[in-house]
């Protein structure tokens, strides 16, 4: 083998060595990143008292209830010191209200029963408070699905339902967690939901409307959670 051949062989061996070192470094970095990710991953299960204030538009201000107490059950995780998510189910109690609706066709008096339910997926950003190890603040941005379920009974006797048309809503929230132990904590959160997108269609054509009867909702959540 000539001098040029020996030089080419040494260069080939050097290239293979460099490639091996780069590959080993990449694999090592990936393993460390994966290990760090799993070290930070922290599942969460929680339950909240969930209060929604959902006002109606002007036409229905004296028809629908404005306050909807209920609850939320959710699961989620923190996958970094400052990031996490949650998936939950929200429901309210069934609220009743007497109403008088004035229309061009006359005056309708009766009782309405209303319940709202749905689900949500929120991304959450956390911020620790340096001087308080047990307190962390958070903000959330998410997608929700809210469905209204409405039943009317008029004084004249007939009972009819609105077809509640569930819609996607934008969810925004800010709040804080207080850790009672390393695993158990409580939280408070205020939020906004774009429930002005909801629809309700009357099954009784003579009742005379099918439109967007609601405005956006202000929400309050108070609850407890467990981290694993």
Image (tube, rainbow, N blue to C red):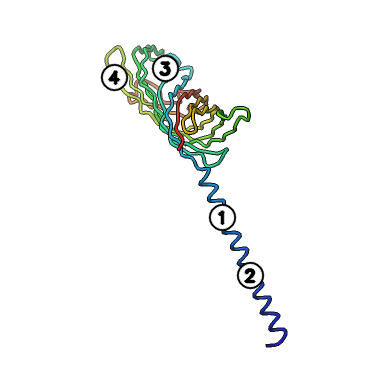
Q: Earlier in the sequence, mark 1 or mark 3?
A: 1
Element under disc 3: loop
Q: Which residue is mark 3?
A: 65
| Residue 200 picture location, percent across and down | 40, 27
Element under disc 4: strand
**What is the quadrant of residue 130 in the picture?**
top right
Disc ID at residue 11 = none
Mark 2 → mark 3, Cα distance in angstroms: 74 Å
Nearer mark to the viewer, of 1 and 4: 1
**Front-most of residues 81 and 131:** 131
**What is the quadrant of residue 69 in the picture?**
top left
Q: Earlier in the sequence, mark 1 or mark 4?
A: 1
Mark 4 → mark 3, Cα distance in angstroms: 18 Å
Q: Which residue is mark 1?
A: 30
**Front-most of residues 156 and 142:** 142
Q: Residues within 10 Å of mark 1 (few under 14, many from 20)?
A: few
Q: Which residue is mark 4?
A: 159
Q: Are marks 1 and 3 in contact (CB under 8 Å)?
A: no
Element under disc 1: helix
Q: Earlier in the sequence, mark 2 or mark 3?
A: 2
| Residue 47 picture location, percent across and down | 42, 29
Residue at 68% x, 77% y is 10
Q: Residues within 10 Å of mark 3 (few under 14, many from 20)?
A: many
Mark 2 → mark 1, Cα distance in angstroms: 20 Å
Residue at 49% x, 30% y is 181
| Residue 176 picture location, percent across and down | 54, 27
| Residue 125 picture location, percent across and down | 56, 35
In the rendered image, the residue lying farthest to the left is 157
Q: Which residue is mark 2?
A: 17
Mark 1 → mark 4, Cα distance in angstroms: 63 Å
């Amino acid at each position: 083998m000539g001098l040029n051949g020996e030089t080419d062989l040494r260069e080939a061996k050097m290239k293979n060595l460099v490639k091996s070192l780069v590959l080993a470094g990449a694999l090592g970095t990936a393993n460390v990143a994966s290990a760090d990710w799993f070290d930070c991953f922290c599942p969460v299960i929680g339950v909240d008292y969930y209060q929604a204030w959902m006002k109606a538009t002007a036409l229905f201000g004296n028809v629908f209830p404005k306050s909807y107490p209920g609850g939320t059950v959710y699961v989620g995780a923190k996958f970094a010191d400052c990031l996490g998510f949650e998936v939950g189910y929200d429901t309210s109690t069934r609220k009743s209200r007497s109403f008088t609706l004035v229309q061009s066709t006359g005056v309708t008096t009766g009782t309405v029963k209303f319940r709202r339910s749905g689900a949500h997926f929120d991304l959450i950003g956390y911020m620790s408070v340096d001087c308080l190890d047990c307190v962390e603040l958070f903000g959330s941005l998410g997608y929700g699905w809210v469905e209204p379920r409405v039943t009317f009974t008029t004084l004249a006797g007939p009972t009819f339902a609105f077809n509640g048309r569930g819609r996607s809503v934008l969810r925004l929230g800010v709040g804080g967690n207080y850790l009672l132990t390393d695993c158990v904590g409580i939280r408070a959160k205020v939020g906004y939901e774009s429930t002005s997108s909801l629809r309700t269609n009357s099954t009784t054509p003579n009742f005379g409307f099918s439109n967007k009867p609601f405005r956006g909702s202000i929400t309050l959540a108070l609850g407890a959670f467990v981290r694993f």
